[in-house]
Structure formats: C-alpha cells, structure tokens
Image (tube, rainbow, N blue to C red):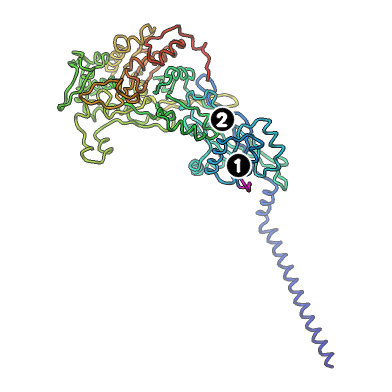
C-alpha cells in the first residue's frame, strides 16, 4: 500500500511539473507572439526604414565650383580632377606604421606628413584625410595592387582648385581651403549643413570668400543599393548637383598684370575705378602671394616665409593698408573751403615757407616759400602754408563732417571681405579712442597738419580712389565693386551684379570746376607735368608725399639717413580725361619718396593702357620699376598684341 501511495504522489508531482512547463512554454510563445505583433504593427514603419537603410545608402554629389573670370573672359580660377590618397584614422590601427608602409609604395614627403598631422588636429577621426594629392597614374596602379594591405586607406578622385596665373591678382581672387571648426559652426548656424555634405573646401579670402554662395552651387544626392559589405551595387535614384555659378570680375587682368609689373619689387597699392559706375578696373597690392599654396594646406616653411616677411605679402594693402594721404588730400580740403564758405577761390594766402601756430613752426617746401597763392595755384604748386591756415580756419570737426560723406575713414562697401576704416579724426573720435583725460582733449595744433593729409589722418587707397571718382564725376559717390556679373556655367548667360544707387553729394558745379582746374594745372604746369608730357589727352591729378615716421621740428628730412621702411611714401590721385572722366586712380608706392617720381608714372601708364590701348615697352617697364622715368620711353605696344603670361 505504501508503494502504491508513493507512486500516486509521484504521478501527481509529475503532472504538476508538466502543467507548469506547459504554462511556461505557453507564456514564452505568448511573449513571442506579442513581440512579433509589436514589431509587425507598432514598429513596422521604423523597421522598414532601417531595413531600407541597410540595403540603400544616400551619397552626396559635390557640385563643381564656379570659375572666376576677368571682365574679358580670361579664366583666373578653375577646377581640375586628380587622384588623392586618403586615410580615415578611425579605421587604421597603427597610423604611423601605415604611413610608413605607404611611403614604400608612394612618395610621401615630410611636408605631406606635416600637412596630414595638421589636418588630423583640425578634423574628426572618422574624416577621410589626404596624405598625398595629385597622384600619377603609375602611383594609382601601384597602390591598387596592394590595396588589400591597407584597411582605412582609399584612393579618391577629387576636384582641385587652381589659379593659373599664380600670384597675379591674388588679393582680389583669394583662395579656398579646408573647412575649419569655426566655419563648420557658421554653416550649421546658417542651416547649410545639407548643402555642404561631402564638401571639404570653402572660400577663405577675396572673391572666393565673398561670393562663396554663388561659387559653391547646390549639392546633389544619389540613392544607391548596397551589398552586405557596403559596396554600391546599383543606383536607385538621384538628384544631380547644380554647379556653382561663374563669377565675372570688373578687373581687367592684363591691366592688373601691367601695374604689378610696374611696381616690380616695390611695395604699395593701386586702385583704378570707372568713376561713372564704381567698377574696379585694377586692384593691386604689392607684394603678392601664390594662392595655389593654400589649396591643399600650406606647408610650415612657406607659411613662415609669408607671415614673417617684413614686406607683409599677405596684407591686402589696397583694402587694409592705411596711410596718410599727404598732399593728395589738398583738393578735397579746397572743396571743403568752398562748400563751407570759409574761403573763396580768389582768396590769396602768402606762402613764406612756414606757418607758425602756438609757438610751433610748420614747414612748407623746406625753407623757401611760394609767395602769394590763390586756391588753384595752391593745388598746382602744392602749398603747405595755404592748407595749414585753412585747416586752422575750418577746425577738425568741420573737416571731419565734410570728408565723411566722401568716404574717408568709412567702410566703402566694396564686395570684398576684411575692409578697414582707417582714421578720420574728430574731437569725438579722440575722446573714444584714448583713455586718459589729457589724451582725450583735442588741441588746436593737432588740426594744422590735417590740412596737408598728415597727423591722425590714415586712409586706404580704396577710399582715396572712391573720393577721387566722386570728384571726377560731378559729386556722385559710387559704391566700388570688383564683380560685375555672375554667369550660368552651362549657357554662359550673365546676370548683372546689382549696384547700389550712387550717393549725390550735391556739390556746387562751380566749386568742382575750381578744384578740377587746379588738378589739371598739376599735370600741365605743376608737379606731374613731365610725367604727362606728350599725352594726347588731358588728365587731372595731384601728387603727394606722406611721412612714414615723424620728423622733429628742427630736423630736416634726409632719406639717405633713414632705414628704407622709414622713408616717405609716394602718392598720386588722378582721373582722365579731365573733361569726361573714364578712369580714376589712387596710387601709393611705399617708402619711395616724391609722388611725381614714383607714383605718377604708374598712373600715366594706366591711363595710356585704358584710354589709348597702349602697353609700355619692356625698357619703359624696367625703368619705371626703378623710378627712373617720367613720360614713357621706347615704342609702346598695342595691348592686344601683348600676351598674358603667368
């Protein structure tokens, strides 16, 4: 009986265990069914999207960057295709060993390693970074045969920017470079992330930067089906990239080349404008630099050479270099006197060679005077005494208020980034600039030197050219611009670059004629007479010499006793033809001395090019570089017959 009871108990226990097991199995199946229902119904759309993403990939198509052309259609910046060897650091276990092994197959120079190291510091580890660019077909073949040895290393075909004329007009054209962290933040802020997918380069300077939006274009996309290994099998759909628009400059690149050649090794800046439209015809800053150095990332040696040079080739002198205008300021002072009624054109001032204020003697032309001078004669002979006394009569704030609308000490609004204001002094400016009370006070003696373009006055050649243009065209101030149009890269149809309406300065035409007569006198019987001798047109201009360093009251200027960088600057402002101006220029040759000897000859050759289609003879260019010419020498050439060479 005991055995029978035990058997029955065991049987009951077994049944209980089977029931529990069945319940567990049922519960598991129920959970599986619930999970299946959740995945099939609730998560269906999300999982379907993930499945599609595993099967497909969306790849950006980088648009070709637009080209940059001069006003005559000459290409100044373009693209070319080349192979690059690129490494994704996050996919490489031993980066240094990989680079060393790669160097046994492909030539990798120390500068390539340094550039790669810098790019790594500026980029994320999963970015693909170039270790070598512009591979030859032979190098591509050698690597392809050994590709299996280098996970995380790929050869890619990319478009590269090139500047075929090298240093020519580099400050205007600018350059592109790899997008840095700050630029990435700006792209995100402007909600342009989608349009920069796959793009690694962006405009850094000049037109490349200011017209980045037009030049960049619109990024396209390709949806492709991929294998389990991530390799593209076929294209499912696509939206093509829209190429960037071409940008057409107002610059005449052959004129630009001529001016840069005329400067030679000298430093300085020149801005030539159409006074009727504001179009910039030449925008020169010397010395220049080769923008091609920056496209792939400039090497340390080249950067140090450019950045540490005493000549500052990276400084855009036309846009950011500020200088005292010297005597080129006098025509504007004369117009201020007429406009404010402080002096008439017939007012005569005796120039005895110096002028004294508060016990301080201000010199004029050394120790000799010019005698009685009226307004026209004061411009022709460049009387300092006339303008010392005029500045005292006007006062600093009246001078400021008259010069400001002309653009002195102001942002002109040119379509290039990085413009500076310079200094147009006033009593308010001094209060804001200096901290100590004794420095904030304006003293009467500080006004005197403003009349001859010295003292606190510092302006750019762009500002001087803009003001000269307004003087030339009857008192209409145009906004200068270097881009005249954008162009469809396929149809070449141009769209004009809209220009702001000129500002009417409302000068009295009779007052303008007085100043114009003085400027014509400079070129026909004054300081630049020899430079314009024989010219078949009449020009109007003013020479200037501006101090680079202050000379003591009792000291005399002696260039031979000063270091080259301390000598006076040579300046010239002019427009031509005088009766119907088509071109206006502002020129400075740093530390060259007298404006008539060094700056005016450059302006003469610019006018001959623009008005007469003449290109100077080689011997004339060489002599002008040395400051050894006035009027042109040799036989000028037709500008159409002179080839443009890098």
Q: Eyeballing the image, is 519 above or below 243?
A: above
Q: Which residue is mark 1?
A: 128
**Residue at 73%, 73% in the rendered image:** 24
Image x and y of residue 302, in percent: 49, 32
Image x and y of residue 589, in percent: 37, 21
> Considering depth in this image, is 154 or 626 the residue closer to the camera?
626
Q: Seen in the image, is 574 located left or right of residue 201?
A: left
> Considering depth in this image, is 136 or 383 the residue closer to the camera?
136
How crowded is the residue under tag 2: few (<14 C-alpha within 10 Å), some, or many (20+)? many
**Residue at 18%, 21% in the rendered image:** 355
Point out which mark residue 161 bears.
2
Q: Is residue 613 visible?
A: no
Q: Main secondary structure of the magenta part?
A: loop
> Considering depth in this image, is 282 or 307 the residue closer to the camera?
307
Residue 93 shown in magenta: yes
Q: Earlier in the sequence, mark 1 or mark 2?
A: 1
């Amino acid at each position: 009986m005991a055995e029978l009871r035990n058997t029955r108990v065991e049987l009951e226990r077994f049944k209980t265990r089977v029931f529990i097991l069945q319940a567990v199995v049922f519960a598991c199946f129920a959970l599986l069914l619930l999970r299946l229902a959740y995945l099939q119904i609730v998560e269906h759309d999300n999982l379907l999207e993930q499945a599609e993403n595993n099967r497909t990939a969306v790849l950006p198509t980088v648009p070709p960057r637009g080209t940059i052309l001069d006003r005559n259609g000459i290409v100044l910046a373009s693209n070319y295709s080349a192979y690059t060897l690129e490494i994704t650091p996050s996919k490489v276990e031993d980066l240094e060993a990989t680079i060393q092994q790669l160097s046994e197959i492909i030539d990798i120079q120390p500068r390539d390693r340094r550039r790669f190291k810098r790019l790594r510091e500026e980029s994320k580890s999963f970015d693909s970074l170039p270790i070598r660019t512009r591979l030859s077909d032979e190098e591509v073949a050698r690597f392809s045969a050994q590709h299996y040895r280098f996970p995380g290393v790929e050869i890619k075909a990319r478009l590269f920017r090139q500047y075929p004329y090298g240093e020519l007009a580099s400050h205007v054209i600018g350059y592109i470079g790899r997008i840095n962290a700050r630029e990435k933040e700006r792209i995100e802020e402007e909600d342009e992330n989608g349009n920069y997918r796959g793009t690694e380069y962006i405009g850094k300077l000049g037109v490349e930067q200011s017209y980045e939006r037009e030049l960049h274009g619109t990024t396209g996309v390709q949806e492709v089906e991929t294998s389990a290994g991530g390799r593209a099998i076929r294209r499912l759909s696509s939206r093509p990239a829209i190429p960037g628009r071409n940008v057409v400059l107002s610059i005449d690149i052959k004129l630009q080349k001529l001016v840069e050649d005329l400067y030679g090794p000298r430093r300085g800046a020149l801005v030539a404008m159409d006074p009727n439209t504001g179009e910039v015809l030449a925008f020169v800053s010397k010395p220049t630099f080769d923008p091609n150095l920056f496209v792939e990332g400039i090497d340390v040696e080249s950067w140090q050479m450019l950045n540490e040079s005493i000549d500052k080739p990276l400084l855009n002198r036309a846009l950011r270099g500020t200088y005292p205008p010297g005597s080129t300021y006098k025509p504007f002072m004369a117009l201020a006197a007429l406009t404010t009624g402080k002096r008439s054109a017939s007012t005569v001032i005796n120039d005895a060679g110096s002028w004294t204020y508060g016990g301080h003697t201000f010199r004029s032309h050394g120790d000799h005077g010019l005698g009685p001078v009226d307004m026209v004669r004061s411009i022709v002979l460049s009387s300092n005494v006339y303008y010392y006394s005029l500045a005292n009569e006007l006062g600093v704030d009246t001078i400021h208020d008259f010069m400001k609308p002309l653009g002195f000490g102001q942002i002109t609004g040119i379509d290039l980034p990085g413009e500076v204001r310079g200094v147009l002094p006033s009593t308010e400016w001094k209060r804001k600039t200096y901290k100590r009370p004794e420095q904030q006070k304006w003293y009467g003696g500080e006004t005197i030197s403003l009349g001859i373009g010295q003292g606190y006055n510092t302006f750019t050649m762009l500002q001087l050219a803009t003001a000269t243009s307004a003087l030339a065209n009857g008192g209409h101030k145009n906004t200068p611009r270097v881009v005249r149009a954008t162009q469809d890269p396929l149809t070449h149809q141009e769209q004009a670059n809209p220009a702001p309406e000129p500002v009417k300065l409302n000068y009295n035409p009779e007052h303008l004629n007085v100043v114009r007569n003085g400027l014509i006198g400079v070129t026909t019987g004054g300081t630049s007479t020899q430079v314009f001798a024989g010219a078949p047109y009449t020009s109007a201009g003013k020479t200037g010499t501006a101090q680079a360093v202050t000379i003591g009251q009792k000291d005399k200027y002696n260039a031979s006793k000063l270091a080259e960088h301390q000598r006076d600057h040579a300046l010239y402002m002019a427009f031509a033809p005088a009766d119907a101006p088509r071109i206006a220029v502002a020129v400075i040759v740093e530390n060259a001395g007298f404006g008539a000897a060094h700056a005016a000859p450059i302006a003469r050759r610019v006018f001959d090019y623009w008005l007469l289609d003449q290109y100077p003879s080689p011997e004339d260019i060489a002599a002008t570089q040395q400051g050894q010419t006035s009027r042109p020498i040799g036989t000028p050439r037709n500008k159409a017959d002179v080839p443009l060479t890098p």
